[in-house]
Amino acid sequence: MNHQRVCDLMSDAVVRVQRGTPFKEIAHLLQEYDITAVPVVDADDRPVGVVSEADLLQKIWGGDAAPPGSAKASATDAAGLMTSPAVCARKDWSVVDAARVMARHGIKRLLVVDAQERLIGVVSRSDLLRVFLREDREIRTEIIEEALVQTLGLAPSALQVDVTHGHVVLTGHLPEHVPASALEELCGHVDGVVAVEFRAAGDVDAEVTR
């Protein structure tokens, strides 16, 4: 299945700072642009780290109450405050790739870089969640055209496909070489799908007659 890519969802208007950007200037930028973190780049616009609200808050914690890594409590610029190295993504990554890396590193955003490792965008968790805003008719069309016809080689009318708020219900008869579990897994990989259910036509008829 063709998942949406990072370049379809990322923001390319990226606020960034240099290693020498002062603490207060970073705090002003986060407030002014209503963001929770800012990438730190070198002279060639390559990401070297990220400064987040949590990094700035270590200045408040300070002293004995500071968590591990509390050297940041005495930092005065981005170089001392940032978390490094920056975790980056490529613009041609799928949303699945991006979500997997975010989960692995326990982070809320990925910096997007080009082939020369220069910063070109940022993609966040909330950006990835936009795939669930797809219209039901778009999801239905993709399931019929790509899952049923292209991947499984079935006729477009082989199954009845109903999609409501991302919940997919497939009704009909499957050929022996296509297990229901494989069909459900395939459709579950379509962007925007929340749940998939296959109902054999005979089971539906039986429910109606009871």
Image: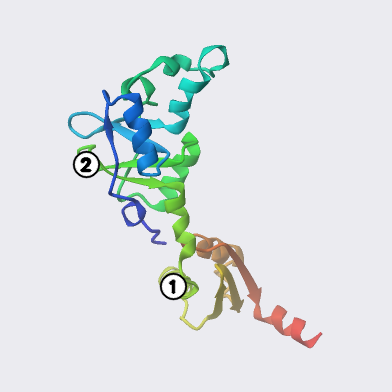
Q: Residue at x 35, y 27 (%)?
A: 24
* Numbered disc 2: secondary structure: loop
Q: Check disc 2 and give the amino acid type.
A: Ala
| Picture coordinates of residue 162, whole percent (x, y) | 56, 77
Residue at far left of view: 44
The image quadrant of residue 16 is: top left
Above-or-below relation of 16 to 90: above
The image quadrant of residue 109 is: top left
Q: Which residue is mark 2?
A: 115
Above-or-below relation of 56 to 73: below
Considering depth in this image, is 93 or 119 the residue closer to the camera? 119
The image quadrant of residue 165 is: bottom right
Considering depth in this image, is 198 or 77 the residue closer to the camera? 77
**First in sequence: mark 2 vs mark 1:** 2
Q: Which residue is mark 1?
A: 138
Residue at far bottom of view: 209
Q: Residue at x 46, y 21 (%)?
A: 59
Q: Check disc 1 and give the amino acid type.
A: Glu
* C-alpha span from label 2 to label 1: 32 Å
| Picture coordinates of residue 182, whole percent (x, y) | 56, 63
Bin the neighbour count of mark 1 within 10 Å (Cα to Cα): few under 14, some 14-19, many 20 and up: few
Residue 49 visible in the snapshot:
no
Q: Residue at x 38, y 23 (%)?
A: 81
| Picture coordinates of residue 204, whole percent (x, y) | 70, 81
